[in-house]
Structure formats: structure tokens, C-alpha cells
Image: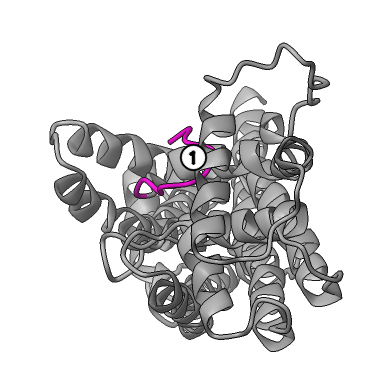
Amino acid sequence: MLDLLVRVAVFLGGTFLILTVVLSAIRSFVLPRNESVLINNWVFMTVRYFFSFLAARYQTYAKRDRIMALFAPVALVMLPIIWLLLLSFAYAGIYWALGEGDFTKSYLLSSSSLLTLGSVEATTILISIVTYSEATFGLLLITLLISYLPTMYQAFTRRELVVARLELRCGNNRTAAELIGWLNRTGSLADDGPQWKVWEEWFVEIEETHTSLPILSFFRSPQPGRSWVTAADLILDAAAVIISSVEQKRDPDMELCFKAGCVAINRVSRYFEERAAAEPVEALTEEDPIEDPTRAGFFQTFDQLRDANVSLVDNREEAWKRYKELRMRYASAIEFLAKLTMAPELKAIGGSR
């Protein structure tokens, strides 16, 4: 009686594990929604700890970047391997529960059936049906990954195209002042709706792809000095400075881009860590210290734009307060994502990284 209960428990446990693995694959690559999958999280975190340990041994960013560039591809390849291993053990337990032999024989039968069209070694019709189901699930998991790799790399290419074009506009310094200066020199500062629409669409796609396929967040740019996180920070900083400081009529395209960017960055951040949501902002007071690096950086940017003949508002203090209010909508999320993805340092106005 006890042996029968154990076999029933092992059968049910194997069935539950099989369903868990298959549903994990479906939720990862088929379900168009940002859901956290426990098996995937364990795999990614384990691989991440290993690569973080290796990267910590190097002092320069270039060497750490070279190590971390392998993290996302390796983690993605490890995912179906873990799925298949779990399926193999789950089916081995089922074969044992159905009386196919000891666990060693059951595991050998499971392994031979996993990536084939079933096993001719099955002793009964029931066992044969189970082997064919195992072969089907094994091929399904591999097919899901292979079929979605082109989709992932297309999203990666579109993301990096915007990052590369942004670098052309703001130069090697990659600061908000440089980007705004370029817009001013080209006569696009007051009327550059198409460009802001492109960046708005980029943010919308970031929100969609980097939550439904979160491993994309860790695919690093082809050039070590680039990052989608720093690019997002640069665009949002430039928009915040223009809205708060530049004397011009309201630009709805720019404001929509800024809103889309804040929503996208915060949602991606919250996907990885709920505590990354923006913290409440304390009210500014007259005692707010001038030594604050964010304040000093803003005034430096303000002066650079004035030297570049950009039309600015008269009240610099009011511009600073407005800018700080806008920056608080995305600063904590950017900070979290920059640390999470080990993004290169950006000469941002905030001066926090």
C-alpha cells in the first residue's frame, strides 16, 4: 500500500513539473504579457551571479563589459537546457511510477525519448504514449526558442539603431546640453516633431519588448560605450531641460515623448524590482543646498545652453525647480536599471552615476 501511495505521489509530482515547465515556456515566449516566471528567474539569477563574480575581478569597465556581454546569450541558451533537464527527470519519475523498472532504467528511457520521436523500448501501449508525449514537449520547447530568436534580435536591432543615431546627434560627450545644442544649431529645437515621435515610438517598444521578453534588457550594445539605459536617460534629460528652461511654445510631440519615456522606464524597472518605483519627492525649500550635484549640474547645463545662444527663460531658479520635479519622474528607475544592466556612465545632469 505504501509503495502504491509513493508511486501515485511521484506520478502526480512528475505531471505537475511537466505542466509547470511547459507553461513556463508558453508564458515566456508566447503570452504577450509581462509575467514573472519562477524557473526563468532562477536560471537568470544563477547565471547572473556567476558572470557578476567574474566581472568583479576586473577593474576597468571595458573588461567588465566584455564579460557581461556574454551573460544574456548564455542565460538564454541555458533556459531550454534547464527546461529539458526538468522534463527528463519528471518523465523518469512517471515511468518509474508506471512500473517500467528502477529509476535508472526509467531515466534512460526518458533521456532516449526526450529529443526523438518516442521510444521503441516501451513495454506497453501506455508507456509508448507517454514517450511520444515527452518527445513532443521536448521538440516544442526547442522550437519555441528557435522561432522567437529572430523576433528578439529584430527588437534588439531596432533598439540599437535609435541608440546609434542618438550618439550621432549628441557627440562623444553624450550630454543633454550637447543634444539640445545640436537641435538648436539645426533649427530643430522649436520644431522637431518627427524626431520626438521616433523617440516616443522607441520608448513604447522598449516598454513592450523589455517586459514581455525581459532578457532583452541585458543584451548589450555592440559598442561598449553605448547603452539603451543611458540613451533613455539622455532623451528624458534633454526633454526635461527643454520643458523647464527653454523659452518656446509648448511642443506636444516632445511632451508625449517625455511621458512615454517615463512610463516605459518605470514599468521596465518595476518588472525587475517592485521597490524601484519612484520614491516620493520632498518639497524644495529655500535651504536646498547649492552644492547639490544635481542642482550644480543643471546650472552648468543652463549656462552652456546660454553660451550656445539657446533662448532660455529668465528665472533660473524656477527652471531648476521645474526640472527637478520632472527628473524625479524617471531618475530612480534610470538609476536602478543602470546598476542592473551595468550600463556605462553617462555624463548626466544629475551627476549620480
Q: Quadrant of residue 140?
A: bottom right
Judge from the rendering whether residue 235 lies leftward or rightward of residue 173; answer left or right: right
Q: Position of residue 212 (x, y in %)?
A: 66, 63
Q: Tell me, yes or no, if residue 34 can be seen here.
A: no
Whether residue 198 is situated above or below residue 232 in the rendered picture: below
Whether residue 241 is situated above or below residue 256 in the rendered picture: above
**Amino acid at pointer 1:** Trp
Instruction: Report the residue that reaches farthest toward the top.
Output: 287
Q: Position of residue 284 (x, y in %)?
A: 79, 22
| Disc 1 target residue | 42
Judge from the rendering whether residue 146 lies leftward or rightward of residue 125; answer left or right: left
Q: Quadrant of residue 321?
A: top right
Residue located at (21% from left, 39% from top) = 55
Magenta stretch in the rendered image: 344-353
Q: Quadrant of the C terminus?
A: top left
* Nearer to the camera, 106 or 192: 192
